[in-house]
């Protein structure tokens, strides 16, 4: 439960979300919905997954314009949802210490 709460917090302070891989698990679906709820830009690297992500976001009545397809990154388009942490690395480390 604590890990899920921390993951949602990390998602809330991230600038964008990357959807990597060639499938969407139930966990990824939940994170995509959370990302859309937070108004995050969602980058997808696989055309089939892009269609699914747009459908998920649309079904939740969020802005599908925030979902963007980025082609040309083949390793990311094959078999993970990773939040963009680069800008927030120090903040995340501090928060992790506070959660302990």
Image: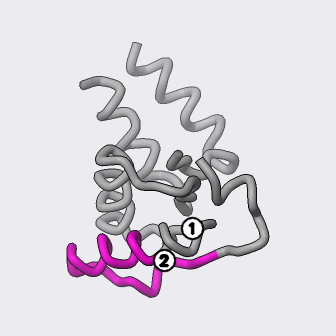
Q: Residue sitting at 30 percent across and 61 percent down?
A: 33
Instruction: Name the front one of labels 2 and 1.
Output: 1
Disc marking residue 97 = none
Q: Residue sitting at 63 percent across and 53 percent down?
A: 78
Q: Residue sitting at 35 percent across and 83 percent down?
A: 63
Q: Residue sitting at 40 percent across and 70 percent down?
A: 53
**Dot 2 alpha-carbon crowd within 10 angstroms: few under 14, some 14 to 19, many 20 or more:** many
Could you tell me residue 9's position as x and y percent? 38, 42
Disc marking residue 67 = 2
**Dot 1 alpha-carbon crowd within 10 angstroms: few under 14, some 14 to 19, many 20 or more:** many
Seen as rendered, the residue at the extreme bottom is 65
Q: Which residue is mark 1?
A: 44
Query: Was residue 53 drawn as part of the magenta stretch in this picture?
Result: yes
Considering the image in quadrants, where does the N terminus appear? top left
Main secondary structure of the magenta stretch: helix
Query: Was residue 65 drawn as part of the magenta stretch in this picture?
Result: yes
Vertical placement of residue 42 versus 30, above or below = below
Identify the magenta region. 51-69
Q: Nearer the viewer, residue 59 or 37?
A: 59
Q: Secondary structure at mark 2?
A: strand
Q: Quadrant of the rendered structure where residue 55 is?
A: bottom left
Could you tell me residue 56's position as x and y percent? 30, 70
Q: Is residue 70 left or right of residue 82?
A: right
Q: Secondary structure at mark 1?
A: strand
Vertical placement of residue 33 versus 81, above or below = below
- Sequence order check: which comes first, mark 2 or mark 1? 1
Tag 2 and tag 1, C-beta contact below 8 Å = yes
Vertical placement of residue 77 versus 54, above or below = above
Could you tell me residue 64's position as x and y percent? 39, 83
């Amino acid at each position: 439960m604590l890990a899920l709460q921390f993951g949602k917090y990390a998602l809330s302070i991230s600038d964008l979300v990357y959807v990597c891989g060639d499938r969407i698990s139930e966990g990824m679906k939940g994170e995509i919905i959370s990302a859309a709820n937070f108004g995050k830009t969602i980058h997808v690297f696989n055309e089939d997954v892009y269609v699914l992500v747009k459908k998920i976001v649309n079904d939740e009545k969020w802005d599908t314009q925030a979902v963007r397809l980025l082609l040309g990154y083949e390793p990311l388009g094959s078999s993970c949802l990773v939040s963009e942490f680069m800008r927030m690395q120090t903040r995340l480390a501090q928060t992790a210490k506070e959660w302990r």
